[in-house]
Amino acid sequence: MKKVLGLDLGISSIGWGMIAIDKDKKTGKILDAGVHIVPIDTRDADEFSKGNSVSASAERTAKRSLRRNNQRFKLRRQQLLAIMEDIGWIQSGFEWQSDDPLYIYGLRAKAATSIIGREELARVFLALNGKRGYQSNRKAVNDDEEGTEYLERIRERDRELITRDMTIGQKHLELLLVNRWSTLKNRTYSRSSYRAEFDRIWHTQKKAYAEMDDRLYHQIANRTIFYQRPLKSQKGLISKCTLEPSKRVAPKSSPVFQVFKIWQQLHNIRIKDDSGQEQFLDMKTKNRLFEILNSKGKMTTAALKKELKIGRLDPVQFNFEVLEGNYTRSGLDAALEGCGFDTYDLITVDWTLEGNDFDKQPAMMMWHLIYSATDQDSLIKNLQEQYKLPDLVARKVANVRLVNDYGSLSVKAMRRIIPYMMQGHEYDKAAELAGYRHSLHETRDERDSRELQDHIEVLKKNSLRNPTVEKILNQLIHLLNAIIQDPALGRPDEIRIELARELKMNAKKRKDVSKRIAENTRRNEDAAKKLRDEFGLTQISRKDIDKYKLWKEAGMKSLYSGQPISPARLFTTDEYDVDHIIPQSRLFDDSFTNKILCESALNREKGNMTAWEYMASKGEAELRRFQQDIEACKDMPFVKKSKLRMQAADIPDDFINRQLNESQYIVKAALQIARKISTMVTSTTGSVTSTLRNEWGLAHMMQELNHKKYEELDMVTWKETKGGKRIMKIEDWSKRDDHRHHAIDALVVAATSQSIIQRLNTLNARADDPQQKRIREKAFEEPWPAFRSDVKSAVSRILISFKGKNKVTTWNTNRYKKKGKGHYGTQRTQTPRGQLHLETVYGQMKWYDPNLTPLDKRFTNAHLIVDPDVRRFVLAHLQSHEMDSARAFGNLKKNPLIYNGKPLTEVRCWKEQFTIRKAIGPDLKLEKVVDPKIHNILQERLYDFGGDKKKAFSDLENNPIWLNQAKGIEIKSVKVIDNGDLIPLHHNGRKPIDYVYTRNNHHAAVFKGPDGERKLEMVSFMEAVERRRQGFPVYASQNDLGWPLEYALHINDYFIFDLDPNEVNIFDPSNRELISDHLFRVQKLTTTASGGPDFVFRHHLETTLKRETEFAFKRITSFKNLTGFKVKINRLGHIAQIG
């Protein structure tokens, strides 16, 4: 029998199922099935679906960049202080900080026009070092940055300084003199304005100080205050070419890519007329369009219609919205206008040149100069020197914004392919003629002779430039390796893959689809509201919404009869049906664009005819009326109008094959991975899987599998269909609430042979074709007689596996620069694999606690005792008992602690409290505000607004809260108390400072004593990292009492409850259905106030948190209730070990 592996690949899950099938004997069996979950943050999944770039570490990287910038500022300050100390301007230990902005800005304003003292000048330079203005790097500029509001405000401020001939310091002083509390923080200026202020101050002061020579200027200005570290080359991150693996892919701004892109678009243009017939461009037209696109930025469909002499209102459809032209050439051509000489060679590539001559031609050299430049001024200078451009033209050329992205092919590959594309060959054929043969298009002999691997290596980091896709494909690799190594499964003879829609689309398409989904959601919500308000419907189904939308789209009438459809009869009778314009028996298309609303009687009369055939059978007059009604439907999309006009000869015979779309890079990557272990690898689509799932009776299987437990909770209802059949429905439930739905889809994919797809493709035969019925029946017959029951049995045995996230650190090798040119060293460091602590840093304050603190075994605050004599006495007593409070104060009644002749049982202590500054908002807790005066002001404000926090503490820009209105001092943020469990991040000498929440627990360690008692120790991720760095085990083998470690729990670890492993063999596959009911995974790990466990377990099948039922969740708050045992589950969903 042939072994076939089906895979359902999503953003955060992999469903898999392996079957053994003999098509000739029509027999088969399911070898195994499972679901592997790859946890991904909900926000990241949403962003990916919207087409936005998603990286698990993007936010962390951005914040690390801020910290590094701060560190570089401090290094510049340190160097500046050292320089000024060396030249005698300041003394060691110079107090450079000042809390008075008027004093500093007064010095800066004065220094620009008058001589000031050396120490004052030092303060001025230190102030300039602190804030040195905005400077854009050419390589980091976004395409639309020039037009942003932020940059325009910077330019306006710069222009004001030039117009008024003043410095930034003088302007800020002017603002402070008007209002001492003016906010200067957001008044950003360009780096050049700060440089201009520095130069003016330098030239004014150098008249009085001889040491201010050119060498010192270079040292202070160029090497310290305004020093800008050159960006490191990121060339190593650029992907390799798929056709020339030794070469990097080309930038999209390259003249070579621009030409390649135009020809690729021209060969892909498809034009549909109103009957749905596709037309192609001839070579003469393509050459004419190439000349236009090569000199322009883009061409719209309206412009193309004009060029092709198609009427503006002619009913034709293009398969694109905009044709992209040669952005690089058109941008340079516009910038070079007015340079005074012929610029043709500077913008036109000569394709007859070869080797180095091609790269050294003027057009390529100019592009490379602009593309590689990092400094604007240097670029302008080079353009003037190398190309003799006037200053104004050179500046225009330097401002040309190149496309900041990369293609998928190298320059070498494109240069070989383009000549064949210019001859009229499409990309695939041109690549083949150029000597490239893609692995996805191999012959049968090549496929059968391909050497298969026993182990697939994981993808290199950043090899796909998409961390989300890279992560799921690496998990696919691990899963495939596990399958071929499993003795019961082994190497599959064939692999069939269905990818989630999001994975098959590029970022632009995901964005378009996300917008379309949002728009459709809005329309559906509007439709549902109208059905409730205007039609009086209470329970609204998806079919009701579709019916309403089809009714509105067709102008509230039936296109088949031409008669209006009364709103009163639309939902109250069975007079109207949703009809498939082209019957599903003839085209595998269940989309909204293939549906229309009509009378039920006419739907039955139409039968298997297309809409056009049916209307033509009614005579010429009716057909003409039908055409006029179609044109009158202004809200109906063009594609639906085309289907309404489509004749039998125009029905496509490869509809499904078009949907497969194996050209997308992600699809290619998944197929290429699978081809490393199997000779036959194919892909299928979600629409095919959905149809076969329904036809094979699997659509409601998830409800059947969950029926019993929901029926016990009285959450099951029975509904009767129009045909009189009773169906079960679980309230507020979806198949996506159970992870196993991925496995059902994977088994359907495994059973979806190419012959089934071919039969579905051929369902466009005429309605009177005698083979039609046999083709349809064969396409939808079950793979083998007991297939449905086998699927149900296999799915009921599935144990969900989760990707582990328990790594603490990984070793990384860092390269650093050593003294001397070209000298580098390496060091190995341990990098944490997660967030060490929450990002908010808290301060600490001491408060006088009026309450006395008892001295007992829980006393730990000896260092906070107010009276210094009592503090020393208590600390000495503790030290004599090895700092053990239980021994020192555990029995003071029997052994009193005598101080000054009296028993000491209570002490007065300071109370340590953590503080943080928070912005005023509706969520502010007034009782936690530190300052009593501000607390009273806020209380009065709340009283004035009737106790409504939202009104009282919102819109503070227009309705400020005043601390001192006469002086213009507003209250925008306040210091509040936080009494959480924080730890110090740093120490200033011996004093702990900078407190943070760890709140990122790595594991819960459970220790068991000799009498069976258990103790819990929560280990934060930060502590786990520190243990690893110090060379200690992450998991302590025993606690302070010497009790051994029983087990450690992590998030997503598995526990089996209410089963005895001595009675049930948990390693026996036949027991998995029983085990499934008792298998839970860790959802939450915290402790109670007394230090006991507070663990939440979620049933392994549950995907959501919306139902906290007994079968879905277990909460454990004492060890006596933690009666289960921990197990490990491998990627295949098999129990690997206990503990």
Image (cartoon, grey):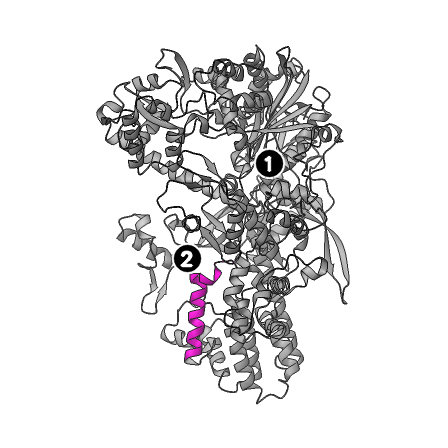
Residue 973 got which mark?
2
Which residue is rendered at x = 39% and y = 69% of the image?
Answer: 181
Q: Magenta residues: mostly which secondary structure? A: helix
Residue 1029 in percent (x, y) is at 71, 47
| Dot 2: element | strand
| Dot 1: element | helix
Residue 953 in percent (x, y) is at 34, 53
Q: Is residue 239 above or below residue 5?
A: below
Q: Which residue is mark 1?
A: 667
Q: Earlier in the sequence, mark 2 or mark 1?
A: 1
Most foreground residue, 945 or 774: 774
Label 2 Cα neighbours within 10 Å, binned few <14 / some 14-19 / many ≥20: few
Q: Is residue 1012 visible?
A: no
Look at label 2 and name its amino acid: Ser
Residue 871 got which mark?
none
Quadrant housing residue 719: top left
Classify residue 62 as left or right of residue 605: right
Classify residue 1067 as left or right of residue 142: right
Question: Which quadrant would the C terminus be assigned to in this image?
Answer: top right
Most foreground residue, 567 or 1093: 567
Give the magenta range.
141-163
